[in-house]
Amino acid sequence: MLGNLVNRGRDQGNDAPAARVAVPPPRPTMDRPTPKTEAAAQLEAAMRPEPVAKPEMISSIGSGMSMTGTIVCDGPMQIHGRVEGELRATEILIGDSAHVEGNVVAQELIIRGSVKGTIRAVRVRLQGNGSVAGDIFHRSLAIEENAQFEGSSHRVENPMESGATAPAAGASSSGTSSSSGSSSPSSGTPSRAQLKGMLKPNLDALAQVPPATINTISG
């Protein structure tokens, strides 16, 4: 009987819950960034979307508009109406139906309409039925077959500067379909060569007259 009690006590001791040991939670590990290879950097740069360029604004004067005065534009300009005054812009397009009476200053100038005045531009192109009446100071000038130009063209290094003057006589050239007349001869004293040419026919005539006839006339 004593043995049974001892066995029961052992069984009760075995049934007792075991002591629990608290285990701390694992610490989060910091992921270190791996260095990018050159190929990965190039691939990432290629996959980036390129910034969309904003379209350049173009100032325009419509065919039904008429303006008077000086017009200055920092960008490109298109003229399709009528302007009386000076035009200044980086790029100017004068359309087929445009009429401009005044000076034009630009870097790039395309003329398809009518211009009456002095033009100062780096590059000038007369296209279609464009017409110009006036002087053109330029670095490059192109005139198409049907275009009309009445005046003088002067090639200068800085045509847009207002102080640019025409080159010496003989350096300028008249434009296609130009109506500039030819220069008249000077009215000064004739040179020795001119006098010799004027007197040569008379001297030749006197050489053919017999001496007896000359003595008779002089007597």
Image (spheres, helix red, strand yellow):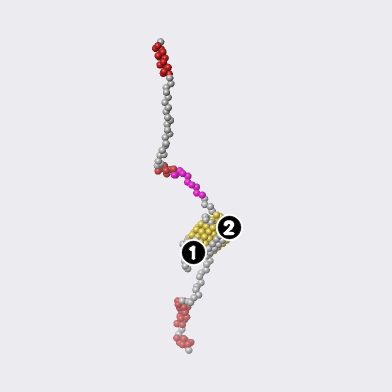
Q: Residue at x 50, y 49 (%)?
A: 53
* Percent position of residue 186, x then y: 49, 73
* Residue at screen point 57% across, 60% down: 69
Q: On the image, numbered disc 2 is attached to which residue?
A: 81
Query: Residue at position x 45%, y 85% from top?
Result: 210
Residue 124 lies, in percent from the top left, at: 50, 59
7 vs 73, nearest the viewer: 7
Mark 1 and 2 residues: CB-CB less than 8 Å, in contact?
A: no
**In the rendering, at what x and y percent does residue 67 appear?**
58, 58
**80 vs 52, nearest the viewer:** 52
Write down the region rendered in magenta.
45-54
N-terminal of the two: label 1 or label 2? 2
Name the mark nearer the viewer: 1 or 2. Answer: 1
Looking at the image, residue 177 sits to the left or right of residue 22; the answer is right
Q: Which residue is mark 1?
A: 164
Residue 57 visible to the viewer: yes
Q: Position of residue 90 (x, y in %)?
A: 51, 57
Task: State the residue in front, 153 or 166.
Answer: 166
Q: Secondary structure at mark 1?
A: loop
Query: What amino acid type should be assigned to the residue bearing mark 1?
Result: Ala
- Neighbor class of circle 2 (other Cα within 10 Å; few <14, some 14-19, many 20+) is many
Q: Which quadrant does the N terminus fall into? A: top left
